[in-house]
Amino acid sequence: MRPLQSLHYAIGELAYAIANIDGQVQKEERMKLHNIVAAELRCKDYNFDVSEIIFQILDKDKQDSETTYNWALKVIKLNSQYLSPELKKTFISVMEKVAKAYPPVTASEQALISRFKKDIADIHGDPVFYKKVLR
């Protein structure tokens, strides 16, 4: 898996962690979660289907939210050179939208989002990489 694919897989995992933190993810919630992630991460420049990523996550063996969060953050750190400020904002937006998808936003969901914001605050992508991509 390429670094950008890994980062998108990680946000899918984080979205699942948010949805799962207050209980099992129901079938209707799965579809809404899929739609949020697919809409937020859709990009014509990627040669992979982001919508499939979320289904891979939801169909594999279920993990608790803490384990899932830790795995996703590790992947983000390993691929941090590709994490642009825009992608960080998108990841936060995905997590917030997933939390709001089934009101109310619980204290545990809000705590995980706050923790994520703090954990990625000091992660900065490689500006040389992004200058090449923007050309």
Image (cartoon, grey):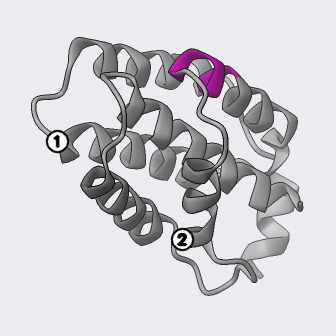
Q: Main secondary structure of the magenta part?
A: helix
What's drawn in magenta, residue-wise?
65-70
Q: What residue appears at the point 53 percent right and 37 percent down from the top-left corner?
A: 14
- Tell me residue 59's x, y (percent): 59, 52
Question: Is residue 85 visible from the viewing direction of this image?
Answer: no
- Quadrant (top left/top right/bottom left/bottom right) for the C terminus: bottom right
SS for tag 1? loop
- Tell me residue 106's x, y (percent): 20, 20
Whether the magenta-drawn stretch holds residue 122 is answered as no
Q: Residues within 10 Å of mark 2 (few under 14, many from 20)?
A: some
Task: Give me the C-alpha separation between circle 1 and circle 2.
Answer: 20 Å
Report the residue marked by disc 1.
102
Q: What residue appears at the point 61 percent right and 70 percent down from the top-left corner?
A: 52
**Given the image, on which type of amino acid does mark 2 rest?**
Ser
Report the residue marked by disc 2.
51
Q: What residue appears at the point 69 percent right and 28 percent down from the top-left corner?
A: 73
- Tell me residue 74's x, y (percent): 78, 27
